Amino acid sequence: MKTRLLVLGGNGMIGLAVLERALMKQDIEVTAFVRTPSKIPEEIREKIKVLTGNILNPENVADAMREQDAVISCMGQRRDFRRTTIFSQGIKNTVEGMRKHNVKYLQFAGIAALMPSAFKFPKFLVPIAYDAEDMMNYLKTVDDIIWVGVMAPNVSHQEFTGSCKVEENKLPGPSNVTKYDMAEWMVTSITDEAVMEEHKHKFLGISSMSTSRCVLQ
Ligand SMILES: NC(=O)c1ccc[n+]([C@@H]2O[C@H](COP(=O)([O-])OP(=O)(O)OC[C@H]3O[C@@H](n4cnc5c(N)ncnc54)[C@H](OP(=O)(O)O)[C@@H]3O)[C@@H](O)[C@H]2O)c1
């Protein structure tokens, strides 16, 4: 049976890469949740289901969860580094919507610099870091949903290298991951019960190691 995957922020940098990698899998049915569908290239849009909504609107989010099995959240605020609530309120709306419609698995794209043993936090990100930290603290209280934080360092537009690795609470390698490596890790692992169980309720650093294959660990 196909996994019905909802991608929040499906028209952002990582979100679009997730849509592209998910479309390569035979066993995934993809829905994107966005504010502006036209920001998804037409050749992708015509192959998926697109829902329009705002992550800060609980009804929009809950409606999007209907008949989904798994959620990948790629919420972000592009180049706007002002204080926000899209992470903290957005994740609460996401979890509540998942509970309402019995959606089991959640991954979110997070910020590696927020992990305990990560590199120093860049000053310009401090205002959004407060909200992203609130999101992480809230998730630590959620044990009825299988969630995994995939904590990115610098995300590049480079091609898929198939060399990504993950490690709990730290980066396993360089401070770089390509968006396609990260997306592949996310879509492959969210459809694998054993991998989700292994990493559940953890924040994982992710790096592209530039070796020849993607290692699920
Ligand atoms: N890109 C990086 O280098 C990098 C590095 C480390 C960590 N991360 C983390 O990874 C996550 C995703 O990053 P990204 O670069 O892919 O993000 P992005 O390109 O900034 O895209 C953000 C997405 O969130 C959506 N969004 C924002 N506010 C929304 C709202 N109120 N309701 C619905 N959708 C909303 C945007 O949709 P609209 O187009 O409609 O605004 C867009 O699809 C972020 O948490 C970011 O901190 C990214």
Image (cartoon, grey):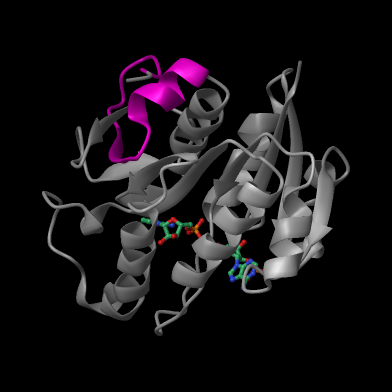
Left-right relation of 167 to 145? left
Residue 80, percent across and down? Answer: 46, 79
Looking at the rendering, in which quadrant would you find the N terminus? top right
Q: Residue furthest bottom?
A: 82
Residue 3, percent across and down? Answer: 70, 26
Q: How many marks?
A: 0
Residue 22, percent across and down? Answer: 66, 31
Q: Residue shown at 45%/80% (left/top)?
A: 84
Q: Where 194 sits versus 62, above or below?
A: above
Residue 163 visible in the current orientation = no
Which region is colored magenta? Answer: 193-215
Residue 103 visible in the current orientation = yes
Q: Residue shown at 88%/43% (left/top)?
A: 46
Q: Residue shown at 76%/44% (left/top)?
A: 31
Looking at the rendering, in which quadrant would you find the C terminus? top left
- The answer to if 179 sits in the magenta stretch is no
Left-right relation of 174 to 45? left
Q: Quadrant of residue 9?
A: bottom right
Residue 49, percent across and down? Answer: 84, 45
